[in-house]
Each structure stands twice: as structure tokens, then as C-alpha cells.
Image: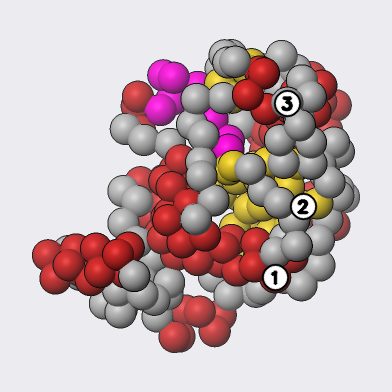
Amino acid sequence: MIYKYIRFVLDLIYPSRCPVCGDFIGYTDDFCQKCRENINFLEESFDIQYSDFSMSVCIYDENISPAVFTLKDKGGNAPYAFAIGISELIKKYLVSEHIDFIIPVPMYKSDKAKRGYNQCELIASEISHISGIPHKFNIVFKIRKTPHQKELSKNERKSNLKNAFALKNPEKISGKNIILIDDVCTTGSTLSEISRLLKNNGAGKIFCLTYCRTDFLKLSK
């Protein structure tokens, strides 16, 4: 209730807009009705190596890409909109699981400085407010700058992220069940590499949740 009240007050100052089309929406809404109807929502999970469960809210296509651009350009209402969808996945698929905390996929420090924020941290923070599950931003770090996965071949993707991430205070994840958050799952390599790192350092179950994922069938051709 407190969080909704805060959003209500903020909406009076900065009215909420649909992350896709920019139209005004209610302060508890994720998208306007028209844009929401065009989103290609998913019902099936998919496999990420080292993850115990992986799921995305929708397919990444022209119907949702403007919201992703908004998220990475200025944030706006996109972090909240994406958090609503991912929180619904948690309630639907992970309600019986004990989750210790949420970890967002980290950015390399210079990339984060250039953008001004890590969009996955914004999403994770909103999910934490909605679900009550705490988040941890100081566990996983990206220690090596890497090319974007979508720009690489299948073989290059496998080595691109090797040793690109590191843990601080790994004892804090021992036996912990963790939700790993990303905005878009393009190839699955980032989530797989971080899941591997967490599992190798004693983590319990790893649940990878993203708002969008690419069409893996088209990607593999």
C-alpha cells in the first residue's frame, strides 16, 4: 500500500506514460490497453544451462522493442512495466519456491557510467517493491568489457563471456535460492555464465527471469 501511494504521488508530478507509445496511463498500469493487446505473451519456459528454471514474459519483436529502447534510453515507466510482468511470473511459477534474493545482470562499469544507470537494477528494484523479495546489487560484477552477443557467431558467443563476471563475498550466496533478472534474453549466454558462476560458488536454485526473449528458433538458423 505504501508503494502504491508513493507511485500515486509521483504520478501527480510525473504522469505515467506507456513505454511503447508514450500515451498517458494510470499509475498502476504497465502499458496502455492497445499496446498491451499487441504484446506476444509467452506461456512456456525455456532452457538456460545451469539454471533451474527460465522464463520470459513475452517475445522480443516490434511490438515491445520501443519499450526496451525507452528502458535503455531514459527509463521512464518501463522498469515498473517490466517489473509487473516479471512479478506475475514469480507469482505464477515460483510461488511455492523459497527465494532468498534477486540479482540483476550487471553492466561493465564504464557502460553503466555512460548510460547513467543499469536498467536491470531498476527492474529488480521495482520487483523487490512489488514482491517483497530483497535484491542484492553488490554480489555479481562484470569485470571485463565484452562485445554484444548478437554481434557474434555461435562459437564466439561461447568464449565471449568466459570469466567476464566475478563475485564479491561469495559466502553470501551459499545455499541461497536466487532470481537472476535481465531485460532481454538474446542468446541465453549471459544468464548461463552468471548461473554457472553462482552454482560453482555454492548457490542453491537459480531462476532466470526476463521480460523479453528473442525467437530462439529463428536465432538458431
Whether residues under marks 1 and 3 lie with C-beta atoms below 8 angstroms apart, the answer is no
Apparent side of residue 144 relative to residue 171 in the rendered image (left or right): left
Disc 3 residue crowd, few under 14, some 14–19, many 20+, Cα 10 Å:
some
Residue 157 — which label?
none
Mark 1 vs mark 3, CA separation in Å: 26 Å
- Between disc 2 and disc 1, whose residue precedes? 2
Q: How many labels does the image show?
A: 3
Give the labeled residue for mark 2: 54
Disc 1 residue crowd, few under 14, some 14–19, many 20+, Cα 10 Å:
few
Apparent side of residue 162 relative to residue 32 in the rendered image (left or right): right
User: Residue visible at 77% across and 52% down?
Assistant: 54
Of the 4 image quadrants, the one containing the N terminus is: bottom left
Secondary structure found at label 1 = helix
Give the labeled residue for mark 1: 92
Is 118 in front, or is 139? 139
Query: Looking at the image, is 170 positioned above or below residue 112?
Result: above
Is 147 in front, or is 18? 18
Query: Looking at the image, is 119 positioned above or below residue 6?
Result: above
Task: Indicate the quadrant where residue 88 lies.
Answer: bottom right
Give the labeled residue for mark 3: 174
Query: Looking at the image, is 116 positioned above or below residue 5?
Result: above
User: Can residue 82 be seen by looking at this rendering?
Assistant: no
Where residue 189 sits in the image (x, y, percent)?
75, 35
Query: Looking at the picture, which amino acid does disc 1 mark?
Result: Lys
User: Can residue 47 be seen by looking at this rendering?
Assistant: yes
> Which of label 1 and label 3 is nearer to you?
3
User: Residue visible at 56% across and 80% down?
Assistant: 38
The magenta stretch spans which residues? 103-112
User: Residue visible at 54% across and 70% down?
Assistant: 63
